[in-house]
Amino acid sequence: MSERIESPELDPQVERVVHDCRIVIDRDLCVGFGDCIEEAPEAFDLDEDGVAVFTNPEKASRSQVLDACATCPVDAITVYEDGVAIIP
Ligand code: SF4
């Protein structure tokens, strides 16, 4: 009998499914300049380490969230739609 491998729990600070997209923040890449927060202040914030986390992305519009993800200067935020990366 093969062993069942559980998929890891999503960390809601760094991965969310919002507006039919899966959005992942790479906290190792984030340099904390806050461009994403300026674009979508309801969706993102910096944590105590100065690294981006999700707050309430559901409250921001889809275009606002996607613009915020696309604005990241170091491509720390990846957006997948239907399993395909659409940002960056
Ligand atoms: S724009 Fe990118 S580098 Fe800047 S805080 Fe957001 S995720 Fe981090």
Image (cartoon, grey):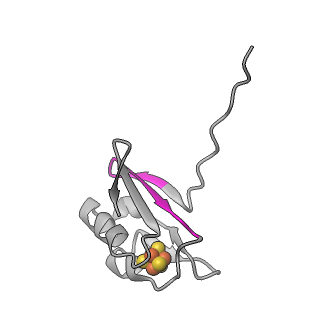
Q: What x and y, as percent, mark residue 24?
A: 48, 58
* 26 relative position to 72: left or right: right
51 or 12, which is in the foreground? 51
In the picture, residue 2 is in which quadrant? top right
**Residue 75 at x, y = what percent?**
42, 70
Residue at the extreme top of the image, as rendered: 1
| Residue at the (60%, 55%) spot, across then down | 11
31 vs 47, nearest the viewer: 31
In percent of width and height, residue 80 lies at 38, 51
Instruction: Say if the magenta span includes residue 7.
Output: no
Query: What quarter of the picture does the C terminus occupy?
Result: bottom left
| Residue furthest to the left | 63
Task: Establish if 56 lies above or below 81.
Answer: below
Q: Is residue 26 left or right of residue 37?
A: right
Q: Position of residue 82 (x, y in %)?
A: 34, 41
Q: Residue at x 52, y 75 (%)?
A: 30
Counting the numbered discs, the total is: 0
At horizontal 64% and vertical 80% (from top left) the residue drawn is 49
Magenta highlight: main SS: strand
**Residue found 51% across the figure and 56% down from its top:** 15
Q: What is the span of residues highlighted in magenta in the rendered image?
A: 16-27
